[in-house]
């Protein structure tokens, strides 16, 4: 499988803040979220904005607050005009409130399609049944269509200045939000969220330089920029952990984690963090930390 498929999971640093000039884009009304989109993609913009609105409302019921987010749904022609992110198709923030997503299929998304003949038969069949378009062709759009909700979760801790304690904990948190929303509100698309991470984890860690939580916290930028395949494995582990935590504890698990992080301004050491989370009832996250290397 090409290493480029793991670029999705690189945490991209926010672009240099630019004046918000949306010339050439159309504004989409009738949504809680402010939305601008490329000409010819109103249907896609409406579909994505509807999910973002729904996700925002659901997250607000869980977390008791909501950030301000502007959504840009961009075609390839408009991508470089409105964001400095070089990879067309990579969902990201221009700053802490402007979320950019792609309006259509693209080379980056297509690079995620695995070589089915290199996968176990059962997993290959799952891929073929989950990531397919109306014409029966493989596409990763079902997975990418959910990632705006992952990014939406980051706006909560960024805009409300929450001490997330660990870089990996911020990623686990947004994956917990995403999984909880899909499981509660759009259960029919749950396979689109879970099958790809299962595939990546199943491939294993051969050749990886880093596998511990301490590694990814201390070398987060290095791993993301220099070892994308390794970083992709971490993200998939967090996706899987979010699913397990939800299955064990339901939607209250992410609420407990949010409240615990929101209430602790002091940065904690490793043992302090485990002790604190345990006292706050954040059992699933503690279990993930303690079982990570098994």
Image (cartoon, rainbow, N blue to C red):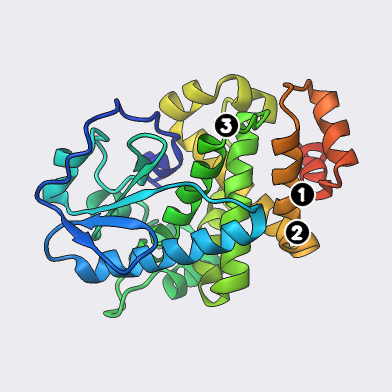
Q: SS for tag 3? A: loop
The dot on residue 17 is: none
In the visual, does 248 lie left or right of 56?
right
Q: Are marks 3 and 1 in contact (CB under 8 Å)?
A: no
Q: SS for tag 1? A: helix
Tell me where residue 290 sits by quadrant: top right
Judging by the rendered image, the residue that carries numbered circle 3 is: 161
- Asked if residue 209 is positioned above or below residue 127 in the image, the reply reads above
Considering depth in this image, is 53 or 205 the residue closer to the camera?
53
Considering depth in this image, is 44 or 262 the residue closer to the camera?
262
How far across and how far down the image is residue 190, in percent? 55, 69
How far across and how far down the image is residue 182, in percent? 56, 67
Observer able to see residue 195: no
Q: Residue at x 48, y 21 (%)?
A: 222
Q: Residue at x 43, y 42 (%)?
A: 6
Considering depth in this image, is 23 or 206 the residue closer to the camera?
23
The dot on residue 256 is: 1
Q: How far apart are the alpha carbons under marks 1 and 2?
A: 6 Å
Q: Are marks 1 and 2 in contact (CB under 8 Å)?
A: yes
- How many neighbours does mark 1 have within 10 angstroms: few (below 14), some (14-19), or many (20 or more)? some
Q: How far apart are the alpha carbons under marks 3 and 2?
A: 22 Å
How far across and how far down the image is residue 38, in percent? 16, 57
Q: SS for tag 2? A: helix
The disc, 3 or 1, on the residue closer to the chain's N-terminal end is 3
Judging by the rendered image, the residue that carries numbered circle 2 is: 252
* Foreground tag (3 vs 1): 3
How far across and how far down the image is residue 178, in percent? 56, 57
The disc, 3 or 2, on the residue closer to the chain's N-terminal end is 3
């Amino acid at each position: 499988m090409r290493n480029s498929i793991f670029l999705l999971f690189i945490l991209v640093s926010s672009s240099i803040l630019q004046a918000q000039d949306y010339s050439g884009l159309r504004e989409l009304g009738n949504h809680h979220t402010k939305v601008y989109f490329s000409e010819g993609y109103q249907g896609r913009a409406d579909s994505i904005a509807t999910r973002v609105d729904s996700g925002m409302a659901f997250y607000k019921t869980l977390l008791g607050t909501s950030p301000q987010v502007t959504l840009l749904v961009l075609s390839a022609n408009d991508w470089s005009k409105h964001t400095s992110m070089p990879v067309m198709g990579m969902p990201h923030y221009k700053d802490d409130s402007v979320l950019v997503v792609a309006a259509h299929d693209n080379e980056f998304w297509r690079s995620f399609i695995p070589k089915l003949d290199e996968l176990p038969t059962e997993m290959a069949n799952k891929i073929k049944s989950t990531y397919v378009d109306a014409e029966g062709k493989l596409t990763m759009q079902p997975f990418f269509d959910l990632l705006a909700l992952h990014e939406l979760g980051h706006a909560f801790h960024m805009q409300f200045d929450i001490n997330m304690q660990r870089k990996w904990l911020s990623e686990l948190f947004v994956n917990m939000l995403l999984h909880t929303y899909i499981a509660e509100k759009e259960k029919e698309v749950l396979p689109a969220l879970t099958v790809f991470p299962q595939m990546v984890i199943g491939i294993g860690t051969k050749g990886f330089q880093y596998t511990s939580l301490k590694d990814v916290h201390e070398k987060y930028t290095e791993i993301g920029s220099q070892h994308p395949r390794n970083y992709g494995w971490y993200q998939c582990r967090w996706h899987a952990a979010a699913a397990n935590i939800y299955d064990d504890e339901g939607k209250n698990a992410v609420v407990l984690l949010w409240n615990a992080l929101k209430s602790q301004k002091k940065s904690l050491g490793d043992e302090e963090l485990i002790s604190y989370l345990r006292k706050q009832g954040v059992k699933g996250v503690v279990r993930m930390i303690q079982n990570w290397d098994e």
